[in-house]
């Protein structure tokens, strides 16, 4: 079971870049890119920070497949 995400979709809706989101949550742009491309699984804390920054519930951003 893999943890997938809709970060790219919600970023586009809010019109923020990977760099902007990275600044909001305190990581590098490369980290956001790696999470979006399923190359890196974020910690629970980072996942929640991303949800807060995107103003979305956890289950709206992350899901298991």
Image (cartoon, rainbow, N blue to C red):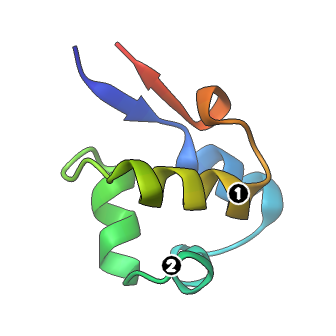
The Cα atoms of the two marked residues, 2 and 1, are separated by 13 Å
Residue at (18% x, 50% y) in the render:
39
From the image, which quarter does the N terminus lie in? top left
16 relative position to 27: left or right: right
Q: Say which of 2 and 47 sits in front.
A: 47
28 relative position to 7: left or right: left
Q: Position of residue 8 (x, y in %)?
A: 56, 51
Q: Which mark is residue 52?
A: 1
- Classify mark 2: helix, strand or loop: helix
Residue at (26% x, 47% y) in the render:
41
- Classify mark 1: helix, strand or loop: helix
The answer to whether 42 is drawn above or below residue 27 in the figure is above
Residue annotated with mark 2: 22
Q: Which mark is residue 3?
A: none
Residue at (72% x, 36% y) in the render:
57
From the image, which quarter does the C terminus lie in? top left
Residue at (81% x, 61% y) in the render:
14
The answer to whether 8 is drawn above or below residue 31 in the figure is above
């Amino acid at each position: 079971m893999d943890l997938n995400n809709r970060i790219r979709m919600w970023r586009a809706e809010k019109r923020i870049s990977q760099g902007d989101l990275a600044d909001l949550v305190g990581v590098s742009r490369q980290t956001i890119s790696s999470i979006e491309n399923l190359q890196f699984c974020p910690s629970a804390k980072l996942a929640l920070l991303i949800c807060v920054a995107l103003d979305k519930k956890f289950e709206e951003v992350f899901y298991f497949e």
